[in-house]
Amino acid sequence: MTKARLARAARCALMTGMFFYGAGALPALAGDADAGKDVFKQECSECHSPKEGKNKKGPSLFGIVGRNAGSISDYNYSDALKNAKWVWTEDKLHWYLSQPAKQANPGTKMKYSGLNDAKQLDDLISYLQSNH
Amino acid sequence: MSPSLTRILRRAAYAPWVLLIACLMLASNGAHAVPAYARQTGNACADCHAGAYGPALTPYGMRFKLNGYTDTDGQGTKIPVAAQITGAHNVPARGDNTTQLSEVDVYLAGRISDHLGGFVKVETDNTGNDHYNTKLSNLDLRFVAKDLKVAGKDTVVGVSVNNSPGFDDPISSLPYASGLGPPAVSGTLLNLSSAHSLYNKVIGGSVYALYNNDWYGEVGTYNTMPTSVQDHLGFNPAGDPGHISDTGYFRFAYMKDMKRQFFSAGVVALTTKRALPRNGPSDDITDLGYDLTYQFLGNRDNIIQASYVNILEQRDYGSTPVVNGVMAKPNGNARDQTLSVTYTFKQSYALQVAHLISTGSQDPVRYPPFGKPDSTANMITLYWTPFGKDDSFTSLANLKLAATWYRYTRFNGASDNIFGAPPGALLITNAKDLDAFTLSASVAF
């Protein structure tokens, strides 16, 4: 009896361990938009404004998620981004921001070395998703 | 002793306030926030300056300066003109309080093309009793080649024509760039508070490069402007730095921007031959210095900026005058040190504390009456800048309300009776008598 209980407990512990081990390998969960606002300040805000219609060295990022690349009419994009026929989905932003901008879009004016902290990247994209 | 130094000390002995006012003006003359740049780039003042008002730069502001002031939001040509007006209420420890319009500045600042840009400041100072003097203060014209690749790494190469070696420095911790130098009797040539500083009175240029965003190097040369030109540009010929020749300026620094933090370590050198007065023999002068800077930026709500600058000047004098049977030493040195720490909250409220030390080798002839030129002072500033942020009433202009306390613990080699008044003299000046408190309001637009 005692052996059976111990065996069940061992299986349970093993499964629990496998669950947490597996969770680490899963895609990151949705980020924290509030934390992402801080990431935006540290990574993006010098060149981009979150306000609608406010361009800096880079275009406004208001409503960026779901927007066509190179589509703000009063911003002077590089040819590289004008010709980029993609939509800024969360996945696309994740891909684009996780590497140097000039690698993702050769010829772009954007000088950004990329964000390699997965949590910060998720938080940032959650913030961008919320900013519309 | 050089005749000009004799003149200064003699004047200081009878009217120390002349010296005091000069020191205070030099120490406080540090505002380089230029709303014309904000209009040109679409950036808020706070993107380039932690407290939304200069002169200390954020790493982003450093890159803007390195890029020759040419970055833009691409929204057409903007008028490259800005202005700053400053009023101040001064409360010296000794002497009369004053409330006056103290300074009006006009800036021509901005880009001419993708490769040409500049910063020109024309400054009008209230010299007392509502008499005003206008001068060409700062000049920095640049040509820059961006987006170069050297060994596969991003590289920026530029040329700067300017009137103060080090003013063009991106890190902005050197005295000419920070606007902060110890009040000095015998300061280095690179200290803007020195009596015969080169600040704004030379013309020259340098070639600089930034490699891989981290390594900065600069080589330049300068000549003093003729006294007649200095006069025309609004400078008192009494502050002539003399004739300088064979001048070399060298700067090398490592700077690391880690987004949430910034660190830099640099060295600076200046070598020149100086004839002061201009028809006199030449002194061989070499300045060697180093500087360390650290910034914690985080999410920009709590920013700490700290810097330390140490510059040693070695002099081989061209003459050894004899006074009262004592011969001046044939060589000597001076050292200027500045430690500054600034905390900024919400890019609006800031406290800056600076410890300023100027020392020099002993020379009873050159530095009467005590033979030591040493001075020690502190500057403590509390200020509020309500605008100049993306989410403030306006991001393109600003107001700065500041309370500043200048505290002297040593001057002219002494803490008490700093000008060596004879026993029984009616007026004895101690170092703390040079203390002053200032309330100021500046608006930049």
Image (spheres, rainbow, N blue to C red):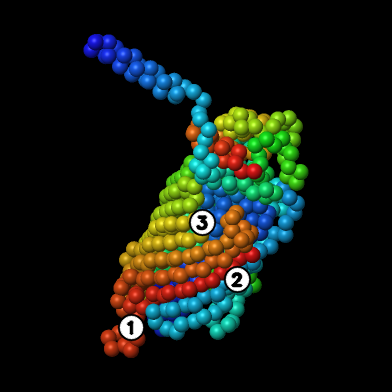
Tell me how far mark 3 sits from mark 2, CA to CA: 21 Å
- Label 3 resides on the chain identified as B
Question: The N terminus of chain B appears in which quarter of the rendering?
Answer: bottom left
Q: At label 2, which amino acid type do we have?
A: Ile
* Residue lying furthest left: A2
Which one is in front in this view, the residue at disc 3 or the one at disc 2?
A: 3
Q: Secondary structure at mark 1?
A: loop
Disc 3 residue type?
Answer: Gln
Q: Which residue is mark 2?
A: B85
Work out whether disc 3 and disc 2 sit on a shared chain: yes
Disc 2 crowd, CA 10 A, few/some/many (<14, 14-19, 20+): some
Which residue position holds label 3? B347
Which label number is shown at residue B428?
1
Q: Residue at x 41, y 66 (%)?
A: B379
Residue A25 at x, y = what percent?
47, 22
Of the residues under marks 3 and 1, which one precedes in the sequence? 3
Q: Is residue B108 left or right of residue B211?
A: right
Q: Quadrant of the C terminus of chain B?
A: bottom right
